[in-house]
Image (cartoon, rainbow, N blue to C red):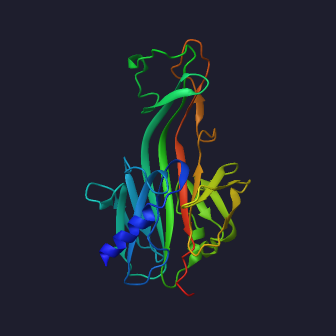
Amino acid sequence: MRKILLCMVLLMLFSPAAVNAHQIFVRPLSGFVNIGDVAILPMAAGHNTSGSEMPEGLTNLTIIRQDGGVVDHIVNDKTDTMGNYPIFSFDVEHPGLYTITSYNGGGSWTHIITNPPATGYWEAGTVDEIDFDAIGKAGWAKDWYVERSYPLHTYGKSFIAGPDSDYSIASKPVGHILEIVPFTNITEAGKGDFQFQVLYQGKPFSDIELIAQKVGDDTKMRGTTDAEGKVSLNLSTTDEFREWVVVADTLMDTRVVEAKDAPRGEASNEKTFVGPVYRATVVLRTDFLKPDE
């Protein structure tokens, strides 16, 4: 039975759909489970929904039961893997809705524009950690500068429904620094407009773009949050089963980062955006209800 489940995992994982930025998310094998089932949780990291790399740095996954029970997992060398995917599983022993959260500290990155306006490359580390005197600058323009420098923090959230699920729990925040909260009942995914709220440090975050994408479809649905951090996206489908990965990214939002003086060429007056970048995902699907329900 476990071999069959793992084969199903493979089929699901290699169904691709490109998204724009490095993030982390969990795509459960099924949206609904019964008591006695084994829930399988593949964790994806990378720039697309099929996972392009193993997550590096601190990475953890938390399973929150409807009754408040919590189980934490940390990705390490003992974690089961399949290709680029850490694979978690648990025996379903309790009814209700399971909220699956994940976190990855994706390291620190600095983008140097060597030949403005756009030619450049990435260095690992923050601008304060990089020895610019030791970097060969042959071919660089005199007005080179550091465009941005940040530590990356990525958060993911998914759901699995069991018998007697209270689906309203999915509309309650779990406390991530940047978080996408489904405001519409998650069982309505696939039926049309779906409302979300984006929170930053627990408060509504306005004017941030939300992007939703079907797994297996390059089309992106985009919207920008209002003053209450809310936005609706069209999550409609005629397919029997669909998944969406919904992403929010603080990018270089000046409410999160700040412009500072940093190493730059003698002909440059450009400042550098410095500060953390937060990315959040939530995975929605059309199979949260018990079959035939």
- Pick the quarter of the image with the C terminus: bottom right
The residue furthest bottom is 292
Q: Quadrant of residue 92?
A: bottom left
Q: Quadrant of residue 33?
A: bottom left
- Pick the quarter of the image with the N terminus: bottom left
Q: Residue 164: x and y, percent?
A: 52, 85
Q: In the depicted view, which residue is nearer to us: 246 or 67?
A: 246
- From the viewer's perspective, tell me whether residue 117 is left or right of residue 79: right
Q: Quadrant of residue 219?
A: bottom right
Q: Residue 223: x and y, percent?
A: 70, 54
- The answer to whether one can see residue 219 in this image is yes
Q: Residue 116: x and y, percent?
A: 59, 22
Q: In the depicted view, which residue is nearer to us: 96 or 14?
A: 14
- From the viewer's perspective, tell me whether residue 180 is left or right of residue 140: right
Count of labels in the image: 0
Give the residue drawn at x 60%, y 38%: 252
Tell me if residue 194 comes above or below residue 253 in the rendering: below
The residue furthest right is 227
- The answer to whether one can see residue 41 in this image is no
Q: In the depicted view, which residue is nearer to us: 258 or 135?
A: 135
Q: Residue 265: x and y, percent?
A: 54, 15
Give the residue drawn at x 40%, y 84%: 35
Q: In the depicted view, which residue is nearer to us: 93 or 293?
A: 293
Give the residue drawn at x 38%, y 50%: 55
